[in-house]
Image (cartoon, rainbow, N blue to C red):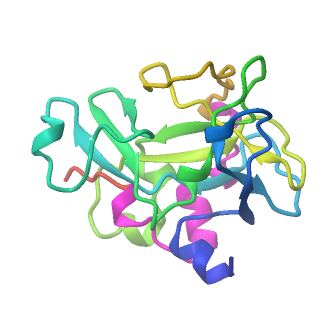
Amino acid sequence: MTALQRACEGVFVSVFEARSTIAGAVDAGNGLFNGSHRLEKGDAILLYGSRHVKLSMDPASYRGGNLNQYNVMEFDDYRIWPVSTLSMCYRVNEPPQNTCANAAFVRWLDPRQSMPSYQRSKGAKHADIVCLHAAREIDPYEEIFAHYGRAYAREYTAGTAATLRKSDVRPDQWPGIVAEKMRICVPSTCVRIAR
């Protein structure tokens, strides 16, 4: 993946897709792996390129896609699900049974943390994005695992979720700051803006 492709997809570090390391899981398919650099706890990995839809909306009536698809997550009053052409997040598997995730999805609401200054200057007063962060050190070429949450409908037993607080994320790893350093905008599909 080139630097331009990573920027367009909201990928903040070098990652790649390969056959998952989950032993015995026929349906695991491919997974997302760290590239050649060690990730530190709190490092921003990539944006969850997603659509936001109110929980109160009837999934059958939404014209933009199937809200019941397998990797929908719920945060408060919204369902979010990945748009595969905009994010590699859809390749992140859950941790295998009896293991703990090494990454976590974090929801960012404060535009100062979630959007570059050049997007904030356009008048956005609220942004709602989800970013995947390293929950511990992740070695080069290690598979990245994140728990999908309690509401996720699964047919297997997943490992446990990693604990990562926003205070564990250094300011230089806030999604908006990383995007600004990379000179990219947070994709509009990753952001729900209330003016």
Q: Residue at x 42, y 72 (%)?
A: 118
Which quadrant of the structure image shows residue 165?
A: top right
The x and y percentages for residue 5 are 59, 78
In the foreground, 193 or 39: 39
Left or right: residue 114 versus residue 44 is: left
- Which stretch did the figure color magenta? 167-190
The x and y percentages for residue 98 are 77, 17
Left or right: residue 3 versus residue 137 is: left
The x and y percentages for residue 60 are 14, 40
How many numbered discs, if any?
Answer: 0
In the foreground, 113 or 38: 38
Query: Residue 158 magenta-drawn?
Result: no
Left or right: residue 21 versus residue 83 is: right
Helix, strand or loop for the magenta stretch, by majority:
helix
The N terminus sits in image quarter: bottom right
The x and y percentages for residue 128 are 37, 46
Which quadrant of the structure image shows residue 37?
A: bottom right
Q: Residue at x 58, y 22 (%)?
A: 156
- Please say if 106 is above or below 3: above
Which quadrant of the structure image shows residue 189?
A: bottom left
Looking at this rendering, what residue extends furthest in the left direction? 61
